[in-house]
Amino acid sequence: MTDGSDRKLEHEVRNLQAEKAALENMLGDAADRLEQIAMSDCEDEETEQAKAAAKRYRRVIR
Protein backbone atom coordinates (compact mmCIF):
# COMPACT_ATOMS: atom_id res chain seq x y z
CA MET A 1 0.00 0.00 0.00
CA THR A 2 1.02 3.56 -0.48
CA ASP A 3 1.36 6.11 2.30
CA GLY A 4 -1.83 7.78 1.08
CA SER A 5 -3.74 4.51 1.26
CA ASP A 6 -2.36 3.78 4.72
CA ARG A 7 -3.41 7.20 6.00
CA LYS A 8 -6.85 6.82 4.50
CA LEU A 9 -7.33 3.42 6.13
CA GLU A 10 -6.05 4.69 9.48
CA HIS A 11 -8.50 7.59 9.26
CA GLU A 12 -11.36 5.20 8.49
CA VAL A 13 -10.40 2.99 11.42
CA ARG A 14 -10.36 5.98 13.80
CA ASN A 15 -13.76 7.08 12.49
CA LEU A 16 -15.20 3.61 13.03
CA GLN A 17 -13.74 3.44 16.54
CA ALA A 18 -15.31 6.81 17.37
CA GLU A 19 -18.65 5.66 15.96
CA LYS A 20 -18.47 2.45 18.00
CA ALA A 21 -17.73 4.43 21.18
CA ALA A 22 -20.68 6.76 20.48
CA LEU A 23 -23.03 3.80 19.96
CA GLU A 24 -21.80 2.15 23.16
CA ASN A 25 -22.48 5.38 25.05
CA MET A 26 -25.97 5.59 23.57
CA LEU A 27 -26.72 2.00 24.61
CA GLY A 28 -25.40 2.71 28.09
CA ASP A 29 -27.62 5.76 28.39
CA ALA A 30 -30.62 3.76 27.18
CA ALA A 31 -29.87 1.02 29.71
CA ASP A 32 -29.66 3.61 32.49
CA ARG A 33 -33.04 5.05 31.49
CA LEU A 34 -34.62 1.60 31.33
CA GLU A 35 -33.32 0.81 34.81
CA GLN A 36 -34.86 4.06 36.06
CA ILE A 37 -38.16 3.02 34.52
CA ALA A 38 -37.85 -0.38 36.17
CA MET A 39 -37.47 1.30 39.58
CA SER A 40 -40.54 3.48 39.07
CA ASP A 41 -44.12 2.54 39.79
CA CYS A 42 -44.69 0.29 36.79
CA GLU A 43 -46.53 -2.95 36.46
CA ASP A 44 -44.45 -6.01 37.34
CA GLU A 45 -44.39 -7.25 33.74
CA GLU A 46 -43.26 -3.85 32.42
CA THR A 47 -40.58 -3.64 35.11
CA GLU A 48 -39.23 -7.06 34.17
CA GLN A 49 -39.23 -6.16 30.48
CA ALA A 50 -37.30 -2.94 31.19
CA LYS A 51 -34.77 -4.79 33.34
CA ALA A 52 -34.29 -7.46 30.66
CA ALA A 53 -33.78 -4.88 27.93
CA ALA A 54 -31.27 -2.96 30.07
CA LYS A 55 -29.38 -6.20 30.71
CA ARG A 56 -29.26 -6.96 26.94
CA TYR A 57 -27.98 -3.46 26.18
CA ARG A 58 -25.24 -3.74 28.77
CA ARG A 59 -24.21 -7.14 27.40
CA VAL A 60 -23.84 -5.61 23.92
CA ILE A 61 -21.48 -2.89 25.11
CA ARG A 62 -19.16 -5.28 26.93
Image (cartoon, rainbow, N blue to C red):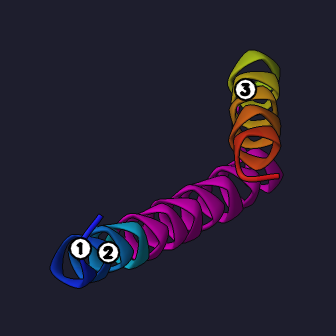
> Dot 2 lies on which element?
helix
On the image, which quarter does residue 6 sit in?
bottom left
Q: Main secondary structure of the magenta part?
A: helix
Q: In this rendered view, identify the residue nearer to me: 5 or 46.
A: 5
Above or below: residue 28 compared with residue 31: below
What type is the residue that disc 3 sits on? Glu
Q: In this rendered view, identify the residue nearer to me: 17 or 55.
A: 17
Residue bounds of the magenta highlight: 16-42
Above or below: residue 43 compared with residue 5: above
Task: Count numbered badges in the picture.
Answer: 3
Closer to the observer: label 2 or label 1?
1
- Label 2 close to label 1 by CB (< 8 Å): yes
What type is the residue that disc 1 sits on? Thr
What type is the residue that disc 2 sits on? Asp
Q: Which residue was labeled with disc 3?
A: 43
Residue 2: image tag: 1
Outermost residue on the top side: it is 45
